[in-house]
Image (cartoon, rainbow, N blue to C red):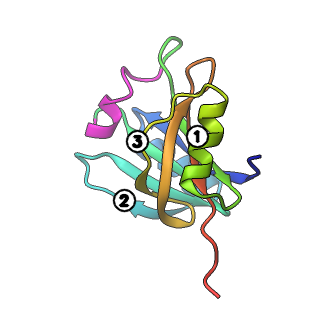
Amino acid sequence: MLEIAGIDHLVLRTTKLEAMLGFYCGVLGCAVERKTSPETGLVQLRAGNALIDLVAVDSRLGRLGGGPPSASENNLDHFCLQLKPIEEAALRAHLISHGIEVGEFAERYGAQGNGRSVYLKDPEGNVVELRSQIEAAS
């Protein structure tokens, strides 16, 4: 059985990166944690124990998500659930046993730093990223 520990991060696509930074940092108090090149188009903001990723729609990453946010285009690229520690093989087996198509696990940056995660889709086609909690070194 999977146990969700919390939301690791969510990804918002935007055509107004500076306004979004002003709102999330200036108004809500988030801090910029990581920034990629403008060509890649990702800015990661610390929001408590989670991250809010802002992706410029006209960047390399942003173009992967389709057109700019509108009444008919998505603003939310995906969200990531942080799971209680679980082995990749056990997670894959669990998902497959429920008829879920499982992608490839890969190293990605999240709220706890670098870690391995996998993407899948819910019944409505929303992209969900799953990543196991990183256990503290003893």
**Amino acid on which the number 1 mark rests in the picture:** Phe
Would you call the spot at circle 1 few (<14 residues within 10 Å), some (14-19), or many (20 or more)?
many
Most extreme residue toward the left, as rendered? 39
* Residue 17 horizontal/vertical position (percent): 41, 42
> Does label 3 or label 1 sit earlier along the sequence?
3
Would you call the spot at circle 2 few (<14 residues within 10 Å), some (14-19), or many (20 or more)?
some
Which of the two discs, 3 and 1, sits closer to the camera? 1
* Residue 8 horizontal/vertical position (percent): 62, 53
Q: Check the picture and name the quadrant holding the C terminus.
A: bottom right
- Dots 3 and 1: beta carbons under 8 Å? no
Most extreme residue toward the top, as rendered? 72
**Amino acid on which the number 2 mark rests in the picture:** Lys
Could you say which disc has been placed on residue 35 in the image?
Answer: 2
- Dots 3 and 2: beta carbons under 8 Å? no
- Dots 2 and 1: beta carbons under 8 Å? no
**Amino acid on which the number 3 mark rests in the picture:** Val
- In the image, taking residue 117 as reference, residue 137 lies left or right, namely right
Residue 105 visible in the shown view: yes
* Residue 7 horizontal/vertical position (percent): 67, 50
Cα–Cα gap, marks 3 and 1: 13 Å
- In the image, taking residue 14 as reference, residue 27 lies left or right, namely right
Q: Which residues are magenta?
A: 59-69
Could you say which disc has been placed on residue 79 in the image?
Answer: 1
Residue under the point 71% across and 59% down:
84
Using the image as rendered, state which of residue 115 and residue 26 is in the foreground.
Answer: 115
Residue 80 visible in the shown view: no
